[in-house]
């Protein structure tokens, strides 16, 4: 599995390099802010405008036409909040640089982002999706229930090529996957997809640990609600991809309205600045907790990715509901990627919407607990886990 170290320099995959590539830690702090000093600003401005004045409606018409053609960001001043927002655009530019793609398009949530991708493919007549379980519960549900008129073929990585059809518009995978942390060889998966776009949900790894576009994924999706925001106070989603696909996504976003609020765009941009530091610190703690859990007789099995990261899944012998009820420092809550540590029972919450048999088939056992490790002290977290695990 390819990983990105602190010293790796970033360059857009197949894109244009506008200046000397900078390291991820530098981009995390500076990307999307290049113009600020020139404007005499330090913090990025928040533009809450829903609409923008223009005395030249002919020029406005030309810009709307240009947008309708290929979804490219209209030149000149913004037109309307659903078409684009300058604060959100800063977050998009920054995330694209971190993922090494030509563009990124932000949405109201991770599910709104996935919806836009599926609608963009369906609009091209490509309604069939090939997907590998496990996926985040709602992503599984969205595909399996056919809510958007898509058809899904579930397969394992080795079966992807055989599952492709002439109307296959997308291959969808997560690695490490929610909630089992199962890892895929993304490069091999991308190869198996041939010309069909691969979407890799990179919510768990973040660009700090893995940049799927460098491994061949055309689309990289994030629930920005998780690590990108990082503080449990903003919902958002984003797709990093090439400019051509980004244009299609902007058109879908304009037509269906799943836009990211500018305040959320501001918070997500702010979150990116500390992303590398947060992910590395939480990962170090998670690695130590995974080690302690592995040696514990109350724990049946521990899942911790080779890639590293701040998520741990583990199976307990005790009733998992009892374990959840006993935490005090750790917050018993769904979601992940926050500064504080969260624990939840996937079979009850995050993956409840997945059919029971499919859920178990994907390795999500009823004894599995998912821990999102935050920035607290390792020993304090262990003391809480130790108590919560109960007596043997
Ligand atoms: C949470 C999550 C999503 C959905 O994102 P929302 O922001 O909650 O809509 C998608 N994929 C993964 C892996 C997630 O963890």
Image (cartoon, rainbow, N blue to C red):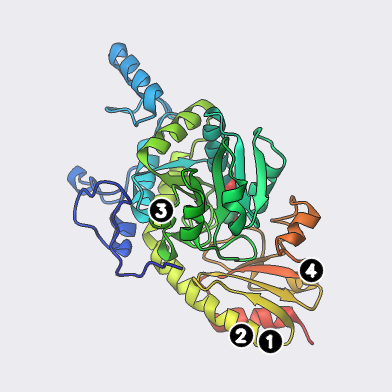
Residue 191 falls left or right of residue 319: left
Helix, strand or loop status at disc 3: helix
Q: Earlier in the sequence, mark 1 or mark 4?
A: 1
Q: Is mark 2 within 8 Å of ligand 1?
A: no
Q: Earlier in the sequence, mark 2 or mark 4?
A: 2
Check disc 1 and report the residue beneath it.
Answer: 296
Image coordinates of residue 197 in percent, x first then y, are 48, 44
Report if the CB atoms under discs 2 and 1 are less than 8 Å apart. Answer: yes
Q: Residue at x 36, y 70 (%)?
A: 5
The crowding category of the residue bearing disc 3, from other C-alpha atoms within 10 Å (few below 14, some 14 to 19, many at least 20), is: many
Image coordinates of residue 97 in percent, x first then y, are 33, 52
The crowding category of the residue bearing disc 1, from other C-alpha atoms within 10 Å (few below 14, some 14 to 19, many at least 20), is: some
Q: Earlier in the sequence, mark 3 or mark 1?
A: 3
Check disc 2 and report the residue beneath it.
Answer: 292
Quarter in which the C terminus is drawn:
bottom right
The crowding category of the residue bearing disc 2, from other C-alpha atoms within 10 Å (few below 14, some 14 to 19, many at least 20), is: some
Q: Residue at x 66, y 46 (%)?
A: 153
Check disc 3 and report the residue beneath it.
Answer: 213
Q: Residue at x 29, y 46 (%)?
A: 15
Image coordinates of residue 28 in percent, x first then y, are 34, 58
Report if the CB atoms under discs 2 and 4 are less than 8 Å apart. Answer: no
Whole-Å distance between the Cαs marked 2 and 4? 21 Å
Of labels 3 and 1, the one closer to you: 3
Whole-Å distance between the Cαs marked 1 and 4? 19 Å
Residue 203 falls left or right of residue 48: right
Residue 109 appears in the figure: no
Check disc 4 and report the residue beneath it.
Answer: 321
């Amino acid at each position: 599995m390819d990983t990105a170290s602190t010293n790796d320099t970033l360059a857009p995959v197949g894109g244009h390099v506008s200046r000397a590539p900078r390291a991820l830690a530098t981009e995390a702090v500076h990307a999307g802010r290049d113009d600020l000093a020139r404007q005499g600003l330090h913090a990025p401005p928040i533009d809450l405008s829903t609409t923008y004045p223009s005395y030249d409606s002919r020029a406005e018409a030309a810009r709307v036409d240009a947008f309708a053609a290929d979804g490219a960001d209209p030149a000149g001043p913004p037109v309307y909040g659903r078409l684009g927002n300058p604060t959100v655009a800063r977050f998009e530019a920054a995330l694209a640089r971190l993922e090494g793609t030509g563009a990124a398009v932000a949405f109201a949530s991770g599910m709104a982002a996935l919806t836009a991708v599926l609608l963009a493919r369906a609009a091209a007549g490509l309604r069939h999706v090939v997907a590998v379980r496990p996926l985040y519960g709602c992503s599984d549900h969205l595909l399996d229930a056919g809510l958007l008129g898509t058809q899904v073929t579930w397969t394992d990585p080795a079966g992807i090529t055989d599952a492709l059809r002439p109307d296959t518009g997308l291959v969808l995978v997560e690695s490490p996957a929610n909630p089992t942390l199962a890892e895929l060889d993304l490069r091999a998966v991308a190869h198996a997809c041939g010309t069909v776009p691969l979407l890799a949900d990179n919510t768990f790894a973040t660009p700090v640990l893995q940049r799927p576009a460098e491994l061949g994924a055309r689309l990289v999706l994030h629930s920005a609600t998780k690590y990108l925001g990082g503080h449990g106070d903003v919902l958002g989603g984003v797709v990093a991809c090439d400019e051509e696909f980004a244009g299609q996504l902007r058109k879908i976003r304009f037509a269906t309205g799943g836009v990211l609020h500018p305040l959320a765009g501001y918070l997500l941009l702010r979150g990116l600045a500390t992303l590398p530091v947060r992910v590395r610190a939480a990962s170090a703690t998670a690695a130590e907790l995974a080690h302690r859990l592995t040696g514990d007789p109350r724990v049946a099995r521990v899942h911790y990715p080779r890639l590293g990261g701040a998520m741990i899944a583990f199976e307990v012998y005790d009733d998992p509901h009892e374990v959840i009820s006993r935490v005090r420092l750790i917050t018993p809550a769904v979601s992940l990627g926050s500064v504080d540590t969260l624990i939840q029972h996937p079979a009850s919450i995050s993956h409840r919407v997945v059919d029971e048999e499919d859920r178990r088939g994907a390795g999500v056992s009823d004894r599995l607990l998912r821990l999102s490790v935050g920035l607290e002290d390792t020993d304090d977290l262990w003391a809480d886990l130790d108590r919560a695990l109960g007596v043997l």
